[in-house]
Amino acid sequence: MKCVVLTDVTRYCHPNVGNAAQFASRPRSHMSSNSASTGRLRGIFQRGKKFWFRYSFERHQYRVPLDTEDEGEAVAKALMIRANPLLAGANPLTEELKSYLADKREEGTYTLQSAVTRRAVLKAWLTERGLKKVCEIREDEIKVWLHSLRKREGKLAESTIESYGMMIRAFCAWLVDRKKLRENPALFIKLKVSTPARRRRFCRREQVDKLIRECPSVALKFILFAGCHAGLRKEEIIQARPEWCDLRRNTVQIVASDDWKPKDKDKRTIPLSLAFHDLLAKEMSAKGQLPGPFLLRPEKEHGRARYRYDFRKPFEEYVTSKKFPWLKPQSMRHTFASLLAIAGVPMFKIAQWLGDDMRVVERHYSHLLPQNSDVEQVLDDGEGKSVKEPGINQAFWVS
């Protein structure tokens, strides 16, 4: 393939983007606003304040917006277009969005729930900005939408808006990878991981014990144990299967099945507290066998709803009656991690058992760790001898 009407510009830049900075350093007064005859790369012109690039390729004329008011940046972008004058054919954005999510699901990058969440966010962005073609995705369109989220009546947390921006960035990166965009217009979005984590509510050990002890049903007991003693997510509680539990080794292992994958595809193994082990072995087992194919409401099959079985209503009714209306599945995970941290369990173990990043766990729970003197006291038997470091049973009153 041969590119036409791209004339010699060696007086100012070599065909690599690095020399665009030298071109940009020339005073703008030496360049006219709309002419290619005064030193500017031929084909670059201005509409209003922004630059465009006009070029010919295989007997067709193209005009491409460069989305910048800086002439040096415009030259760099024009050189990128010159190197790759024809992008792959792009479908309407709604179709590209479907293909993107299908690709990520097939390769296992996103779980079903992750894909549903991203579809909702990205569709809202495209609809509200009226974007229908890939070529309409620009940095200013993304910035305007993110700014509108900050101005809405039901104000979103800044961290939520940042996560929405990262979803857009990932989608645009996929389009670039498929050669349907030349560059990612969302690269300006950065996830701020250094913001201090807010303190989260959690139950004390005696409160967890009381909630479990006064439970009216084994199903509710299992939900509380799975959340507060093992840190399982809501969907993991619903999907829990008998083969996950090894009662001889006192462990529960979260693993994928043919029709379900855990978050981020990560399998993890969590030690069973003795109390949780007793529930499974004594109250839920029949003739030495746990119920199946699921531990919670095994008779419920997955239909068209998001969850195979949603325990929200009976759970909320129970915890509200016990004066804990704020206790949700996520709060039970916070309870699990917080009680482990208070007991002195190392952060890396808590991160492994939660299936979360170490930095995230440290931000949320390191303030709960006992002081050095407390740790030494826990690890000393009173006679100066070291004892086993605290584990899951120390966090839940079980010796």
Image (cartoon, rainbow, N blue to C red):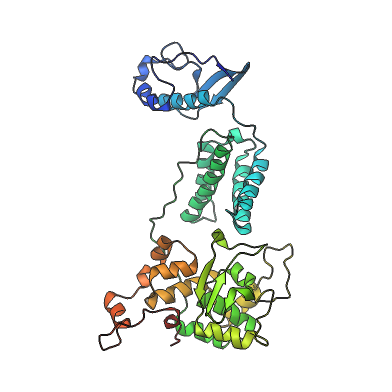
**Would residue 378 be seen by someone viewing this image from the given angle?**
yes
The number of callouts visible is: 0
Q: In which quarter of the image is residue 95?
A: top right
Instruction: Decide which of 137, 235 is in the foreground and name it.
Output: 235
In the figure, is residue 188 to the left or right of 126? left
Residue 26 lies left or right of residue 78; in this view the side is: left
Location of the C terminus by quadrant is: bottom left
Q: Up-down: is 61 above or below 222?
A: above
**Screen quadrant of the N terminus:** top right
- Residue at the image position 35 percent from the left and 73 percent from the top: 369
Residue most extreme to the front: 248
Residue 296 is left or right of residue 163, and the answer is: right
Quadrant assignment, res 100: top right
Provide residue 11's location: percent of width, then percent of height: 38, 14
Observer-nearest of 207 and 3: 3
Corner quadrant of residue 216: bottom right
Q: Where is residue 328 in the image (x, y as percent from the top left)?
A: 55, 72
Q: Is residue 269 above or below residue 55?
A: below
Q: Nearer the viewer, residue 283 or 140?
A: 283
Whether residue 328 is visible: no
Residue at the spot 59% in from the left edge and 33% down from the top edge: 135
Picture coordinates of residue 259 (x, y %)?
A: 67, 62
